[in-house]
Image: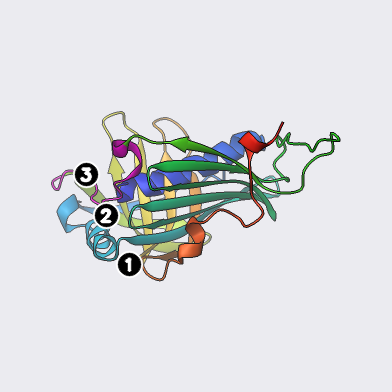
């Protein structure tokens, strides 16, 4: 999976949680553009090179609204990927993709968890469904971004939580803009601005491209295969 798509997938998961919890995301605004450069000269491109060298990436995306915090934790290592979704302190869902297999996991705190035992009592363990993937679906986390090297990038600053960060923004052909806010070589926030709408700010924590543990790509020890349940 390409780097931009990894970050976008995590952001999409955060927004999906927002829909499930019936909350809108946190707004933002006030970015300042200083200059324009080609993508090949951007910090995003430099970071892409670093990630490509380690073939690892870990990040946590967080968005709070109406007193509810939604968190998505995403990890990639070689050809494996995992994603876990939390609302508050409750673990709702997970996904593991490796070896051309995809495992969708539901945890008991997930509001739509409907698994019961033989007596009709709700189970208290995670339950997964496994899907086989075609080779071109599940195996290539190549980390090569799909921005053209000459794609225009607006460079400036963007305020997040009261602090101005170095920012790079890319606007697509539909007029939608994605802004990446950096602290050094770490992304600390992503801002999605659909044309004509308010910006949606998603905080990014614990961004790193090393030391991603293999345990993140394993099913929970107490997980149950949904096919074994009646």
Number of the label disc, if any, that sits on residue 41? none
The verdict on residue 136 being magenta is yes
The magenta stretch spans which residues? 135-150
- Residues tagged 1 and 3 counted as in contact (Cβ below 8 A): no
Numbered label attached to residue 185: 1
Q: How is the image coloured?
A: rainbow
In the image shown, does 207 or 91 lie closer to the viewer?
91
- For this orientation, the residue located farthest to the front is 228
Instruction: Name the disc covering residue 147, or none.
Output: 3
Residue nearest the viewer, comparing 128 with 59: 128
Split into 4 quadrants, where in the image is the C terminus?
top right
Residue 88 visible within the image? no
Whichever of labels 3 and 2 marks the residue nearer the N terminus, that label is: 3
Q: Nearer the viewer, mark 3 or mark 2?
A: 3
Q: Is residue 9 above or below residue 78?
A: above
Q: Which mark is residue 155?
A: 2
Q: Nearer the viewer, residue 218 or 152?
A: 218
């Amino acid at each position: 999976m390409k780097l931009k798509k990894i970050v976008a997938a995590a952001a999409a998961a955060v927004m999906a949680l927002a829909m499930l919890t019936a909350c809108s995301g946190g707004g933002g605004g006030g970015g300042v553009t200083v200059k324009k450069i080609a993508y090949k000269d951007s910090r995003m491109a430099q970071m892409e090179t670093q990630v490509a060298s380690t073939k690892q990436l870990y990040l946590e995306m967080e968005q709070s609204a109406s007193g509810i915090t939604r968190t998505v934790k995403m990890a990639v290592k070689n050809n494996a990927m995992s994603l876990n979704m939390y609302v508050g302190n409750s673990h709702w869902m997970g996904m593991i993709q490796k070896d051309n297999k995809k495992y969708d996991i539901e945890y008991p705190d997930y509001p739509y968890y409907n698994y019961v035992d033989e007596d009709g009592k709700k189970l208290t363990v995670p339950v997964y469904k496994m899907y086989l993937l075609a080779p071109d679906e599940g195996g290539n986390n190549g980390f090569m971004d799909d921005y053209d090297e000459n794609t225009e990038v607006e460079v400036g600053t963007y305020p997040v939580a009261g602090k101005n960060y170095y920012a790079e923004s890319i606007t697509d052909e539909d007029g939608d803009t994605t802004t990446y806010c950096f602290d050094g070589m770490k992304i600390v926030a992503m801002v999605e601005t659909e044309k004509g709408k308010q910006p949606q700010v998603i905080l990014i924590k614990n961004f790193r491209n090393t030391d991603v543990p293999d345990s993140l790509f394993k099913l929970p020890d107490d997980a149950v295969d949904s096919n074994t349940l009646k």
